[in-house]
Image: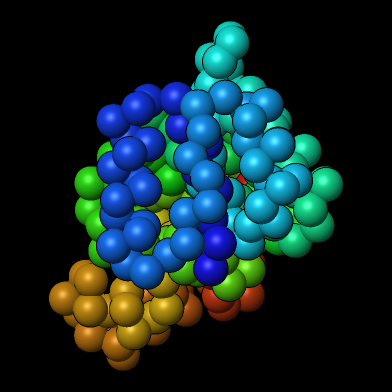
Amino acid sequence: MRIVIAEDDALLREGLVLLLRSEGFDVAAAVDHPGDLLTSVATMAPDLAVVDVRMPPTYTDEGLRAALEARRRVPGLAILALSAFVEDGYAGDLLAAGGGGAGYLLKERVGKPEEFLDALRQVAAGGTVLDRDVVAVQLARPRPGDPVATLTEREREVVALLAEGHSVPTIGRLLGIGTAAARRHAGDVSTKLRVPDGAQAMLSYLRA
């Protein structure tokens, strides 16, 4: 898998390069400016772009906008966006764009390599991954009838893990409750929120 990285923090950028290369990924370019991301995508034809949302010159959403433009130029390009802050709106923009695998994670997840690499692989395979802290913000958003208010704390944990792209057996393992219990909680969540089973349906609900 060929990857390009766009991150203006030199320490994090080099850390990502070392981590990904140590796992056998082909890091074709690592740049610190959104314009250089577009150039790298055009010349390297990567499968995935790992992109900081906030980049020069204004440090607002240049990285995300460049990533979406890169996907327009290279259809199907998977995008894993990284942010130092919970920015619900930016996550929604990325997920709503469609056209390829998409993920939105807080930068602190890079410090947990197993979780980060799992998310990266899911996005590269065309899946969708959303950081659990962003999920928490979206669950707090008022909705008609407020069905989220009926979720238990355990069910909220299941929603967050579904949004991160985990399977039911993995959720059971991560929560220490087993597959059967995790499947029951996921079913209860689907019933309460009136959405079909599965991560994609849950993500569609969260960004509605």
Q: Is residue 149 left or right of residue 207?
A: left
Q: Position of residue 117 (x, y in %)?
A: 36, 62
Q: Nearer the viewer, residue 120 or 206?
A: 120
Q: Please name whichever residue, 94 or 110, is drawn nearer the observer in this view of the structure.
A: 110
Image coordinates of residue 145 in percent, x first then y, are 61, 47
Q: Looking at the image, can residue 163 be seen?
A: no
At horizontal 48% and vertical 40% (from top left) the residue drawn is 30
Taking the spot 26% from the left edge, 57% from the top edge, the residue there is: 113
Q: Residue at x 36, y 48 (%)?
A: 17
Residue 62 visible, this angle = yes
Q: Is residue 174 left or right of residue 79?
A: left
- Residue appearing at x 23%, y 71% in the figure: 174
Residue 166 location in percent, x, y? 41, 71
Picture quadrant where residue 170 is located:
bottom left
Which is nearer the eye, 178 or 79? 79
Residue furthest left as drawn: 176
